[in-house]
Amino acid sequence: MNDKQVKALIKQGEHGRHSIGNGLYLRIANQSIGYWVVRYTIHKKRREVTIGKYPALSLADAKFQAAQIKVDVKKGIDPIAEKKRDESPDLKTVNDLAQDWLKECDKRLKHPNIPRRVYTKDIAPSIGELAIEQVTPRDIRAIINKIAESNRPTIANDCLMYCKQLFRHSIKLDLRPSNPAEAFTLSDAGGVEKSRSRALSIDELSLVFKCFRENNNQFTREN
């Protein structure tokens, strides 16, 4: 069947499925609209998948796609099953990965705003727009060094911890084979944190809580 014949069938509005060859069919529905359908058998089951609408998908392109589907089916790949998989989130950049990871943080953490804030402020500006597989240990070192040099050792340690969690999430989703942050320890970031024995005086406490009240958008009740 050629393109002229396809147009004639659609114009006539002959409802039904018309064979093109190699498992490709033109299905004409109501209002004389034609859809390309590929029929195939996999795992002893007869199936069919719609691949496009005519003329948005030309006869030549429909034949090409049908041939590709036939090759995939021979390899045991079911196009309908693959189409369902395609509905899952398409994670390309570190920002995409972080959004998926932070959703999990929302479910399991009491205060998920903390990793979200650290990621947004200290991680995303450096690597957020990179492809997930492009991030290297040098990128992680640059991030934690920058934080440590700004005299924020505790945040440097937190950032390292969240980087490890973030890229473990990427391994779990089979988005990369290794974790670029895994080899780093606290000594590479802010160092081992030690509690202080000094207590604040009454006057100092008054000043601290005054500062908290004046900056309640940063110092929340959890802090």
Image (spheres, grey):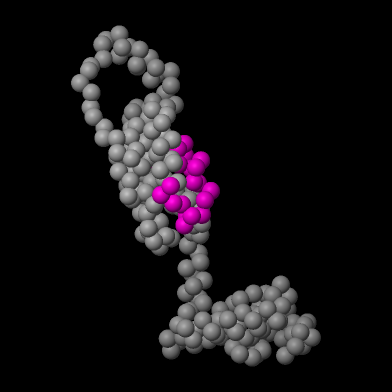
Residue drawn at the location 46% of the way across and 86% of the way down: 42
Residue 207 image offset from top left, x and y in percent: 35, 12
Residue drawn at the location 38% of the way across and 28% of the way down: 151
The part of the chain drawn in magenta is 115-138
The answer to whether residue 127 is left or right of residue 163 is right
Residue 64 image offset from top left, x and y in percent: 64, 81
User: If the image is split into quadrants, where does the N terminus sit?
Assistant: bottom right
User: If the image is split into quadrants, where does the C terminus sit?
Assistant: top left
Position of residue 82 relative to residue 169, above or below, is: below
Residue 7 image offset from top left, x and y in percent: 77, 83
Position of residue 151 relative to residue 39, above or below, is: above
Residue at the top extreme, as displayed: 203
- Magenta span includes 122: yes
The answer to whether residue 167 is left or right of residue 70 is left
- Which of these two is toward me, 171 or 34? 171
Secondary structure mostly seen in the magenta stretch = helix
Q: Is residue 92 visible?
A: yes
Q: Is residue 103 visible?
A: no
- For residue 209, which quarter of the picture? top left
Residue 192 image offset from top left, x and y in percent: 26, 35
Position of residue 199 relative to residue 108, above or below, is: above
The answer to whether residue 116 is left or right of residue 197 is right
Residue drawn at the location 40% of the way across and 56% of the way down: 170
- Which of these two is toward me, 37 or 182? 182
- Magenta span includes 111: no
- Which of these two is toward me, 98 or 23? 98
